[in-house]
Amino acid sequence: MIAYGRAQVDESLLDDIDNHHFRLAFARQREMSMRVGMAMAALPECSAQGISNIAWALSKIGGELFYLSEMDRVAQVAVGKVRDFNSQNVANVAGAFASMLHYAPNLFEELSERASNVIHTFREQELAQFLWAYASLHAPADSLLDALGNAFKDVDGITPLSEKALSAHPTFFSEPTRENILSRRFQ
């Protein structure tokens, strides 16, 4: 018997609970694995919203360590369908990859280009998420930044960033690597 406060608990009961949790976690892992497999099989047929949803879901259940090969597959499929993405899809896919610290250069180049084409449809939160994702991964967003500069060039009080201003922060705008992404994250 083990005492927990005033309660007396039989050790065999604790073992049963522990074994039950282990079996439940294993069953959930197997079920999750099956669901991820089904999503990966359906991925090529998914709409832009479906691709965005799968990327988001993988980032929520996978964190920084799991589903990296699946995210590579999402990137591969998304590159082929990025022309169908709306601003929400662009922001959510970029955000999903950034939350996993997973940089896919071809995808991010295409997302930046697509974002520059749909710049006028971005809501504030989508734009913030998109810019956060690119900043977190040190991903170049030249076409989007150019589009933002053009969109706001006639607005009083807003001046575009100059090359001098950008060069003042070389670490922030450096080539994305896992090492400088992690070092920036923990500063």
Image: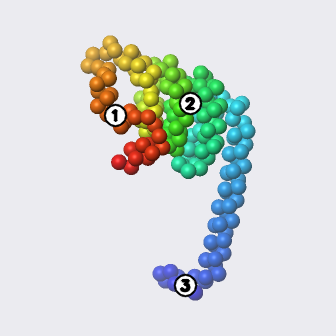
Question: Sequence order check: which comes first, mark 1 or mark 3?
Answer: 3
- The image position of residue 45, as x and y in percent, is 71, 30
| Amino acid at circle 1 | Pro
- Rendered residue at 59%/25% (across/down): 82
Question: Sequence order check: which comes first, mark 3 or mark 2?
Answer: 3
| Residue 125 visible at all | no
State the CA–CA distance, disc 1 to disc 3.
Answer: 59 Å
In the rendered structure, the answer to whether residue 108 lies left or right of residue 42 reads left
Query: Is 22 situated above or below 154?
Result: below
Query: Is 83 situated above or below 2?
Result: above
Which of the 4 quarters of the picture holds residue 23?
bottom right
Which of the 4 quarters of the picture holds residue 134?
top left
- The image position of residue 40, as x and y in percent, is 69, 40
Q: Dot 1 lies on which element? A: loop
Outermost residue toward the bottom?
Answer: 1
| Amino acid at circle 2 | Leu
Q: Does the residue at mark 1 contact the one at mark 2 (Cβ under 8 Å)?
A: no
State the CA–CA distance, disc 1 to disc 2.
Answer: 23 Å
Closer to the observer: label 3 or label 2?
Answer: 2
- Rendered residue at 46%/33% (across/down): 139
- Rendered residue at 32%/12% (across/down): 154
Which of the two residues, 187 or 11, is positioned nearer the viewer here?
187
Image quadrant containing the N terminus? bottom right
Residue that label 1 marks: 170
Q: Does the residue at mark 1 contact the one at mark 3 (Cβ under 8 Å)?
A: no
Q: Dot 3 lies on which element? A: strand
Mark number displayed over residue 2: 3
Which of the 4 quarters of the picture holds residue 158?
top left
| Amino acid at circle 3 | Ile
Residue that label 2 marks: 107
